Image (cartoon, rainbow, N blue to C red):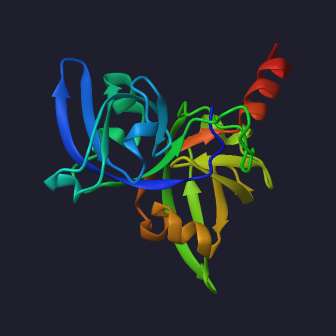
Amino acid sequence: MFTGIITDIGEVIRVEELAAGRRFRLATSYDPETIAIGASIACGGPCLTVVEKGEGEAASGGRPWFAVEASSETLARTTTGNWAPGRRVNLERALKASDELGGHIVTGHIDAIATIEERRGEGDMAEFRFAAPENLSRFIAEKGSVALDGTSLTVNAVDGARFSVMIIPHTLAITTWGERQAGDQVNLEIDLVARYLERLRSG
């Protein structure tokens, strides 16, 4: 379980093909002594399991690294299918029971890929407009929460399957959102509460 509050930006430094997926090695500022093999880390949104870790090497610029594996299903349903060395990725460690829930409840289970249709500057902030799949539009509500590339964000406005968010300077600076532009694809996770309310409503 996660909160959507990003704590590091990782960088993909190696991609290995597996029989039914890929293994990604990511450079990080996390202390490897605090990362357990088998731990869950949200990498750009998807919850992935740490399978290996190590100290700095040339490819990581001397930073520590950890490796995760993505199945063929994850590669098909998320942006991980397009990851290559040099890709920067929002990271969040799994929530501890004593941690502050600063964002909203995020599972790391991606529902779809959304596309940035427009980025517009609003002073030192940035407004992003997205197109989401039609079947998810009923889960996205004005002033509700979504997780985009693992970041907990508040929906500003909704128009059918299109919605917008406003991102503050702090978030632009400490996440990959400062780099995002129109045409980019991002991982979308709808609000967990909205998902269960719809399930209850539909019987």
Q: Is residue 23 above or below residue 154?
A: above
Farthest top residue in view: 203
Image x and y of residue 98, in percent:
74, 36
Image x and y of residue 154, in percent:
72, 56
Image x and y of residue 173, in percent:
52, 71
Q: Residue at x 73, y 29 (%)?
A: 195
Where's the N terminus, which quadrant?
A: top right
Question: Is 154 positioned to the left or the right of 136 in the image?
Answer: right
Farthest front residue in view: 33
Q: Quadrant of residue 104?
A: top right
Is residue 38 visible in the rendered structure shown here? yes
Q: Residue at x 59, y 39 (%)?
A: 189
Q: Residue at x 42, y 23 (%)?
A: 38
Farthest left residue in view: 58
Between 26 and 167, the one lying in front of the other is: 26
Q: Is residue 37 above or below residue 179?
A: above
Is residue 187 visible in the rendered structure shown here? no
Where's the C terminus, which quadrant?
A: top right
Farthest right residue in view: 201
Counting every numbered tag in the picture gives 0
Image x and y of residue 26, in percent:
31, 45
Question: Is 80 positioned to the left or the right of 110 in the image?
Answer: left
Between 194 and 59, the one lying in front of the other is: 59
Q: Residue at x 49, y 30 (%)?
A: 40
